[in-house]
Amino acid sequence: MAKHKKSFFEKLTGIVKIKDEDNCDMESIEQIEEEIKESGDETEGQLAIDMYQTQSDIVIKTMVAGVKPEELDISITRDLVIIKGRREEARMDTCDDYFHRELYWGSFSRTIILPQEIDSEEAEATNKNGLLIIKLPILDKNRQTKLKIKTV
C-alpha cells in the first residue's frame, strides 16, 4: 500500500480519509494508522471548549465523554491551562456499515491562555456525564493581608 499523505483538513481534524472504500477492512485501517505513527505525523485533536467568567471564577467547559478521569491530564499555571487526554475507540470488525466517521478517536489536547491570573491552588475540576467543568478562582490583586512581625 502506498504511503498516505494527509491533507490539511486531515491534519486539522485528525480524521484519516480512506480512499478505497470497497477495500475498507480493519487490516487497511490498521496499516494506515501504523504508517502515520511511523512517520511521526500523528497529530492530536483539539478539544472544543466554552470559557466564561463569573465575578469570582473563570469557568472552562469541555466534552470528554468516553475518557476516564485518570486518563485526563490537566496542568494549570496562573495564566495557562493545558488539557490532554486520549479517547480509545472500541474496534469494530469492519467499517462497511459506516455512512459517516466524524467522531475523533486518539490523543487530544488544548492549551488555553487565560484572560486573567488565577489561583491555581484553589482550582477544581468535575466531570458530570462526560462534561468536564474546570473552575479557576480569579486572583484578587487588590486583596491585602496584614503581615505579623515575629520577634526573634
Image: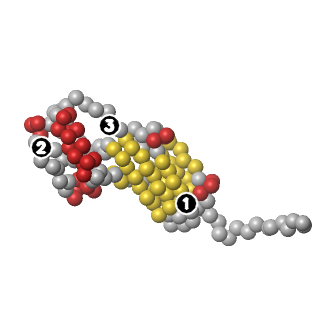
Q: Quadrant of residue 58?
A: bottom right
Direction right: furthest residue: 151
Question: Can residue 137 be seen from the camera position used here?
Answer: no
Question: Residue at point 20% right, 40% down?
Answer: 31
Point out the tag, 3 or 2, that comes first from the N-terminus: 2
Quadrant housing the C terminus:
bottom right
Q: Position of residue 83 (x, y in %)?
A: 45, 52
Across and down, in percent, residue 44 comes to 34, 52
Q: Position of residue 135 (x, y in %)?
A: 55, 53
Residue bearing the label numbered 1: 77
Amino acid on which the number 1 mark rests in the picture: Thr
Amino acid bearing label 3: Glu
**As drawn, 73 above or below 21:** below
What residue occupies the far front of the structure in this picture? 38
Distance Cα–Cα, label 1 vs label 3:
31 Å
Residue under label 3: 89
Residue placed under numbered mark 2 in the picture: 1
